[in-house]
Image: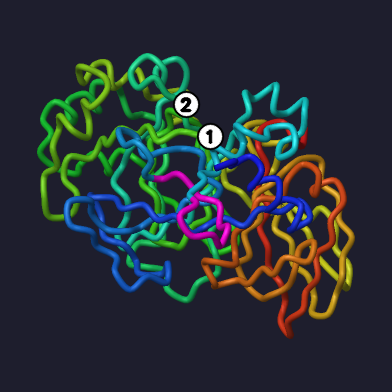
Amino acid sequence: MDLEKIINREIDKNNGVLRLKPNYVARPLYPAGGRLGLDKIYINGKGWVSERWLGSAVNVLGSRDEGLSELNLGLENVKIYFREALSMLPERLLGKSYSKLYNNRFGVLTKILDPGIQIPLHIHAGEPYARIYWNSNPKEEAYHYLDHPCKGPTPYIHLGFHTDVTESEVLELLKRWSDDRILDLSPAYRCNIGEGFHVLAGVVHAPCTLLTLEVQEESDVGTILQAKVYDRIISKEQYLLNGPISEEEVLKLINWDVCRDPKFYRKYHIVPEIRESNREFTERWIFNPKISRKFSGIELRIAPNIKLNMSRKGAFLLFAWRGKGKINGLEIVGGDPYRDEVFVSYEAAKDHVIVNEGKEELVLYEIFGPDVYV
């Protein structure tokens, strides 16, 4: 079977756009919020389905293919991962210079987080520790809180440490591993729909229960620092020492300067910035390239019965949140997991047409990889 030929044919048929299948991931530590449109949200042996991964060329750490997005080809007995498509047709999908610079990878992973309770306090390793301990990319990330009527029980986030917290205080709690008192050391901030936060690698955080659009580097590394997660003590070996070999080494993963920055909120709280706005559409940076070169993201709101000729600097993931329309003739429908997620190739990104065919505003999110907008 000539998979490359199949992908080329699909790109041609859809004028440069590839539809992706919905891709759900289960997590064992916390229940799901039930906002991903699934009937079954618990899988025996894996946990609660609390995340949907979009445009993913990343597998869940320790698994072979869990977490990898598939192309939605509508063909029986043909299974092609998005990662394979990028590898086979990098220049067509990503552009010649981008694919060469980033080793035929999109370079960014997008998720919808649906936690039913606050996610326990944890960190993601930066350079060089992610590679030393997990042979993985570091994981810088950012959040945008989606407009959903269910906020969950804890719509606030713990981020960083209070300015006077010492390393010895944290080490004592990690050694003891008997409670959730580490949350006392981390300030909490209210999470507002339509806003978000930027979380550098090495920053401790306990994400809130709002439905969240998350963008991050291509990585699944993580280290839990909170021993007690609501009513149970979790495994220290599995969640704290699963990479580093001691509590002292865990401390090295923490970016202490950023975590204890007295101006943390002002620096890393995200309020979207308007790029362009008129009666037909509004564009806002939800992940601003001025903040990070690792990724960027645009919210695009299009009024009913409007047709737009658009141009972007690079390939991007397109996620339809609300409304219905078409991109280059391919239907996109917010709320339908089989029609709300597409990858727009470099070819199409340079010159494409988006039409709002519905009676309500069409709300789209566009996610770009590193250095597309600098």
Residue 22 left/right relative to 373 = left
Examine the rendered structure and indicate whether residue 252 appears above or below residue 334.
Answer: above
Quickly name the residue at label 2: 138
In the picture, which quadrant includes the C terminus?
top right
Q: Residue furthest front?
A: 1
Secondary structure beneath dot 2 equals loop
Q: Is residue 316 above or below residue 247?
A: below
Q: Amino acid at mark 2?
A: Pro
The residue positioned 36% from the left and 52% from the top of the image is: 25
- Rendering coords of residue 102 (x, y %): 64, 25
Verify CB contact (< 8 Å) between mark 1 and mark 2: yes
Q: Amino acid at mark 1?
A: Glu
Question: Would residue 9 be seen by someone viewing this image from the given angle?
Answer: yes
Whole-percent x and y of residue 16? 76, 51
Q: Which portion, as a residue range, is magenta?
A: 67-78
Is the N terminus in the top left, top right, bottom left or bottom right quadrant? top right
Dot 1 falls on a residue whose secondary structure is: loop
Q: List the residue tagged with mark 1.
A: 217
**Residue density around tag 2, few if under 14, some if 14–19, many if 20 or more, within 10 Å:** many
Q: Is residue 236 left or right of residue 360?
A: left
The answer to whether residue 142 is seen in the rendering is no
Left/right of residue 167 with respect to residue 128 in the rendered view: left
> Which residue is found at the position 62% from the left and 23% from the top?
103
- 350 within the magenta span: no
Identify which residue is drawn at 45% across, 55% down. Answer: 77
Q: Position of residue 364 (x, y in %)?
A: 68, 63
Mark 1 → mark 2, Cα distance in angstroms: 7 Å
Q: Report which quarter residue 353 is drawn in.
A: bottom right
